[in-house]
Image: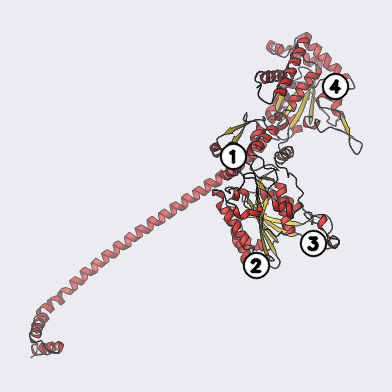
């Protein structure tokens, strides 16, 4: 087998969203991964290197504020001048410049391509330059037929958005430089659709708004009918990898999936998966008032293009991850979003006898981790209120008649059950209500603390959908459905009966009435709890069977220090928050603070520079005035001195020279001699008053 040396690839700004993903996945590529196996001949198969050989070694530049560890990147560069950067580029086989995020990279990308083009004669081996651009260079293109998509075969007809004129100019320059000598220096432009996946960048505002549930409805700026060309970031990497390995003849490629979804369809899918499930259309001008969206991002979100990547289909055999687009793969994208940003829900179940302090512990956990507190009383009342609202506001002309009928049927069942059982629900209805609450987007996003439920083994089995499936190795595992609501931590609080009775006896009458802790009722509930946990099939046993061993905590004191120690033990068990609370928000705030400080520092430097230039201009003006004033005074003094020095000479001339000279001139004018000068000289000699 032939041994192949990995290609050295340079990527700019590898700490930015797109470049970071490109760097990460190129490092994971192996030689031949992008080659169609059906197109490989037997001879090529024999020469093919061993499986698993790395295809690329990635190097690149990072920003000044970058402190993230990227072990997959071979070398990272900071504070390089142009000469040093050119030296690094010359060492690489492939140079990738991504200009889809930061406009300030346009100048550097143009310089890099030009510098490499000028150094072609010094190349020891062929090099490739790939410009990852954006479909915004097509934003103002006029379609011949609205139903016919734009393709990369007619890239010469593209017209850029006014704010992306520099992008299309750079695309043209890069393409032109690649035509000089393609065997030594080939250039490609990959026009990327709006990128999504792996934590999001452009769509992050909408994902975050939906996840937090800050608004009742997710905003859609404009009418939402604009078709947005998109591509998953991993699919974009696949396109780039294919370009590097195949080196296709076309030098301009569209990198878009086949979805052609509208912005309204995308945001409805986001809202349904993460948020309340509804959207609200707003004037597009409001988008520019959103601090979390840059002008470049807003321009991109308002683009309206129907596109088809013809060259990708004809030239490559891409292993698509999300070829059908964002809407069709929303579940996968949401999972990537949560994993990439560490937004994993914390699901806790707090069990124990009545009056042991379950609600207090649950509230404190919810406050610390920003979770949803699930109690039976509140869940039942909220469910009934929502069902009544659904039935009351049903629209006969809408398409939700079936859901309204289901809501009406469930509402009737709940009320009937409560009337029959003295305000209590039957187990199957109670489990359904709680399960629906746990399956709601807020609980699935942030997590929950289930307070005092389930109480029996059968309730737990029905609630968490405990039907077991046999895996290939013969071990049992819970179904994928139950994983969405299965608690990752179960806290089992307990205390002696004497302690619990004393605590209830010392409670104010108001709390006794609120929690139904009257003596007879409390003792009945306590006995029932003890009886349920004495059986072999208890709630604790159910969790033990699923390898979720409860954390047993004994309550022996109501003193504040003991309560603090108890909470500290619980928090240590659960770990750090995993949401947009203190941990994630601090990171974002820190990034924002650094950006603001950098902008403030740059503004101060500009102001200082302007002040220095103004002082220098003032100083130069003052020096000029002083110099010109001194020069004028010097000239005046010289003139006065010359005038004083000329007085004796003037007197001498007037007394001894001018009378005779004047007389000679008069005689010369009267005589009109042929040689006036000789006549005047002869006259002066003859009439010299000093001629003795």
Q: Residues within 10 Å of mark 1 (few under 14, many from 20)?
A: few
Q: According to the image, label 2 marks what residue?
A: 120
Q: Outermost residue toward the right? A: 474
Mark 4 residue element: helix
Q: Earlier in the sequence, mark 1 or mark 4?
A: 1
Distance, label 1 to label 4, CA atoms, is 48 Å
Dot 1: element? loop
Q: Assess whether mark 3 and mark 2 are in contact (beta carbons under 8 angstroms).
A: no
The label on residue 458 is 4
Q: Residues within 10 Å of mark 3 (few under 14, many from 20)?
A: some
In percent of width and height, residue 377 lies at 72, 18
Where does residue 617 sit, x and y in percent of width and height?
39, 56
Q: CA distance from mark 3 to mark 4?
A: 61 Å
Q: Is residue 71 visible?
A: no
Give the Cα distance between marks 2 and 1. Answer: 43 Å
How many angstroms separate mark 2 from mark 3 (CA)?
A: 24 Å
**For the point 35% across and 60% down, which residue is it?**
623
Query: Of the residues tagged 2 and 4, which is closer to the observer?
Result: 2
The residue carrying mark 1 is 292
Q: Nearer the viewer, residue 166 or 544?
A: 166
- Looking at the rendered structure, which numbered label has been put on residue 4? 3
Tell me which corner region of the image, top left, top right, bottom left or bottom right, holds residue 640: bottom left
Q: Residues within 10 Å of mark 4 (few under 14, many from 20)?
A: some
């Amino acid at each position: 087998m032939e041994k192949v040396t990995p290609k050295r690839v340079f990527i700019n700004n590898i700490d930015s969203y797109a470049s970071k993903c490109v760097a990460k996945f190129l490092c994971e590529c192996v030689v031949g991964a992008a080659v169609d196996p059906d197109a490989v001949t037997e001879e090529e198969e024999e020469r093919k290197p061993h499986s698993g050989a790395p295809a690329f070694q990635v190097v690149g530049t990072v920003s000044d504020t970058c402190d993230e560890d990227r072990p997959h990147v071979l070398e990272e560069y900071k504070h390089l001048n142009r000469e040093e950067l050119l030296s690094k580029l010359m060492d690489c086989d492939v140079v990738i410049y991504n200009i889809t995020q930061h406009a300030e990279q346009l100048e550097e990308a143009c310089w890099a391509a030009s510098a490499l083009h000028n150094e072609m004669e010094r190349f020891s081996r062929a090099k490739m330059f790939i410009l990852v651009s954006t479909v915004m260079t097509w934003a103002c293109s006029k379609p011949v037929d609205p139903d016919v998509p734009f393709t990369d075969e007619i890239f010469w007809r593209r017209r850029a958005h006014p704010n992306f004129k520099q992008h299309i100019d750079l695309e043209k320059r890069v393409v032109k430089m690649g035509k000089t000598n393609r065997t030594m220096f080939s250039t490609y432009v990959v026009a990327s659709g709006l990128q999504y996946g792996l934590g999001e960048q452009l769509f992050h505002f909408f994902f975050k708004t939906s996840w937090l549930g800050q608004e009742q409805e997710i905003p859609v700026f404009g009418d939402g009918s604009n078709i947005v060309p998109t591509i998953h970031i991993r699919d974009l990497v696949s396109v780039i990898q294919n370009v590097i390995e195949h080196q296709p003849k076309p030098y301009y490629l569209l990198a878009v999936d086949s979805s052609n979804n509208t912005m309204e369809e995308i945001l409805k899918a986001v809202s349904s998966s993460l948020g309340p499930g509804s959207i609200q259309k707003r004037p597009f001008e409001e988008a520019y008032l959103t601090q979390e969206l840059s002008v470049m991002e807003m321009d991109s979100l308002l683009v309206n293009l129907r596109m088809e990547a013809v060259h990708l289909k004809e030239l490559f055999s891409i292993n698509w991850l999300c070829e059908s687009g964002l809407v069709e793969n929303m579940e996968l994208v949401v999972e990537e979003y949560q994993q990439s940003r560490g937004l994993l829900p914390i699901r806790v179940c707090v069990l124990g006898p009545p009056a042991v302090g379950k609600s207090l512990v649950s509230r404190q956990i919810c406050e610390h981790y920003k979770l949803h507190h699930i109690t039976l009383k509140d869940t039942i009342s909220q469910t009934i209120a929502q069902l009544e609202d659904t039935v009351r506001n049903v629209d006969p002309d809408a398409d939700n008649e079936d859901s309204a009928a289901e809501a009406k049927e469930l509402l009737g069942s709940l009320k009937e059950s409560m009337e029959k059982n003295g305000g209590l629900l039957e187990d199957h209805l109670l489990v359904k209500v709680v399960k629906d609450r746990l399956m709601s987007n807020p609980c699935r996003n942030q997590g929950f603390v289930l307070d005092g439920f389930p109480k029996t083994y059968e309730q737990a089995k029905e609630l968490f959908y405990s039907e077991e499936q046999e895996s290939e190795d013969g071990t049992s595992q819970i179904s994928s459905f139950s994983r969405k609501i299965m608690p990752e931590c179960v806290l089992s609080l307990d205390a002696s009966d004497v302690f619990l009775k004393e605590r209830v006896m010392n409670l104010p009458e108001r709390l006794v009435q609120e929690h139904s802790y009257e003596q007879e009722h409390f003792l009945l509930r306590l006995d029932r709890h003890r009886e349920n946990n004495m059986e072999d099939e208890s709630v604790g046993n159910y969790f033990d069977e699923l390898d979720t061993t409860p954390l047993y905590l004994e309550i022996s004191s109501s003193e504040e220090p003991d309560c603090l120690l108890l909470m500290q033990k619980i928090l240590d068990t659960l770990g750090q928050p995993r949401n947009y609370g203190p941990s994630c928000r601090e990171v974002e705030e820190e990034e924002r603070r650094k950006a603001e400080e950098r902008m403030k520092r740059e503004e101060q430097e500009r102001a200082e520079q302007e002040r220095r230039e103004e002082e220098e201009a003032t100083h130069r003006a003052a020096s000029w005035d002083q110099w010109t004033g001194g020069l004028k005074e010097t000239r005046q003094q010289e003139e006065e001195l010359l005038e004083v020095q000329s007085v004796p000479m003037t007197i001498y001339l007037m007394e001894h020279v001018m009378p005779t000279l004047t007389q000679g001139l008069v005689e010369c004018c009267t005589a009109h001699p042929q040689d006036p000068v000789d006549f005047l000289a002869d006259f002066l000699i003859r009439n010299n008053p000093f001629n003795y």
